[in-house]
Amino acid sequence: MPKIAFIGAGSTVFAKNLLVDILSFPELADSTISLMDIDAQRLRTSEIVAGKVARTVGAQPTITATTDRRDALRDADYVICMIQVGGYEPSTVIDFEIPKRYGLRQTIADTLGIGGIMRGLRTIPVLLDIARDMAELCPDALLLNYVNPMCINQWALTRATGIKSVGLCHSVPHTAGELAEDIGVPVEDINYLVAGINHIAYYLKFQHKQTGEDLYPRIHQVIAEGRVPEANRVRYDMLKRLGYFVTESSEHFSEYVPWYIKRDRPDLIEDFNIPLDEYIRRCENQIAEWESMRAQMEDADAPLDISRSVEYGSLIIHSMETGTPRTVYGNVPNTGIISNLPEGCIVEVPCLVDANGIQPTRIGALPPQLAAMMQTNINVQALTVEAALTGKREHIYHAAMFDPHTAAELSLDQIWALVDDMIDAHGDMLPAYD
């Protein structure tokens, strides 16, 4: 049975979902599960929950918990990473509050923009430390990375390390489910092809499995009939402009582009229903609710939701262990997979998984307007990775300078000052930059 290490297992709810997925497979029911987190209290909660999951699904795994990362990684076959460097406070608060002083508002701030840049800069050194430990302690293991900013982190990992890794995100199946509901077709009856970069990938095909009907006209009909969901106004607007539907939510997507969040256009915020500071509110609500949630999860008599999630992690592990072929969506280096995106950047594409591992599907050229949209984000990703791997402070300015939303709101002098303030506020959470 494989050993599966969970790094950042104090993310109890997410860890529980992945454990349900993994241990529900009879072939994985006796796996060794090694839970690791730097927060001993949250780790203890996750250990209790892991035991409840095992009992509920009838599995008999070996479950260990440790605050020693090297101990968790030793002889692992799979490493699931779900860390957040710096936590909510101070790091996430810094990412929102300092830009706000400059008039720069964000919604999630974990993928692009000044918040995504800083999250990448403080996360990459930790991921590289994990990769170095893996090279020593479990060199053949596969890293299943769920940590944002996905493209930035994966690009740094593939440039600076030799470990096997894949970036995983649930935006593709989640959005497919939303679209299926909008057009009234069961999602299990839909065949789709998605390609691009994480959070800016597009449904190139959206068809009915049985009839082969192109379902895009039905999606356009949602606009024509005035049925666009309030939370999805940005994405449906982009569908009108570009002709394809994007995978990430409207509140996420709105901060990757220069058109929807503008400090002197409050009408846009209202018209497109953009929830500014949404991530901050969600984090604060989770903190407020954590103690009661923790008590319920630790209660041996409290029921536990064991429904399977749409996450790809367990499917990859099961396919590699049993040889069962599956298609998942993974974030992998662009080795000619998408011909009109830069070589080496991280692309999100369908991948075949079986006993031979993860094998990306070659897509070819994307529609040029989609590739152009992605390139604006790839520029920021590339410069952030360059800053992290070279230690050159100048590239942090460059990354912020070319960020679409930041550039639309601030002057160059303001961008330079903002970056300086962000670096100063992060203190020891960042390495020294020349």
Image (spheres, grey):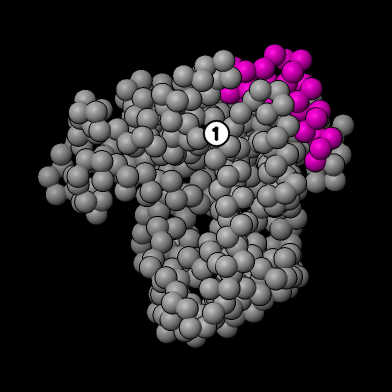
Badge 1 element: loop
Question: Foreground: 197 or 281?
Answer: 281
Residue under label 1, please give it: 276
Q: Residue at x 68, y 44 (%)?
A: 92
Q: Mark 1 belongs to which amino acid?
A: Leu
- Magenta extent: 397-426
Placement of 400 over or under 199, stated as above or below: above
How many residues crowd mark 1 within 10 Å: few (<14), some (14–19), many (20+)? some
- In the image, is residue 252 above or below residue 284? above
Q: Position of residue 14 (x, y in %)?
A: 53, 61
Q: Would you say residue 401 sits in the magenta stretch? A: yes
Expressed as whole percent of the image width and height from the top left, the position of residue 351 reads 42, 50
Query: Is residue 3 visible in the rendered structure shown here?
Result: no
Q: Is residue 278 visible?
A: yes
Q: Write down the quadrant of residue 225 in the picture.
A: top left
Vertical placement of 253 versus 410: above or below? below
Residue at 67%, 17% (x, y): give it. 410
Picture quarter containing residue 35?
Answer: bottom right
Is residue 434 rendered to the left or right of residue 267? right
Number of numbered labels in the structure image: 1
Query: Which residue is farthest left?
Result: 211
Seen from the viewer's position, the closer of residues 174 and 294 is: 294
44 inside magenta stretch = no
- Residue name at image x 58 percent, y 73 percent: 295
Quarter holding the C terminus? top right
* Residue at horizontal 19 percent and vertical 45 percent from the top: 184
Taking depth in this image into account, of 201 and 274 the one nearest to the observer is: 274
Instruction: Locate residue 355 relative to residue 325 in the image: left or right.
Output: right
Estimate the x, y position of residue 63 in percent, counting from the top left. 59, 80
Q: Main secondary structure of the magenta part?
A: helix
- Residue 352: percent from left, percent from top: 39, 54
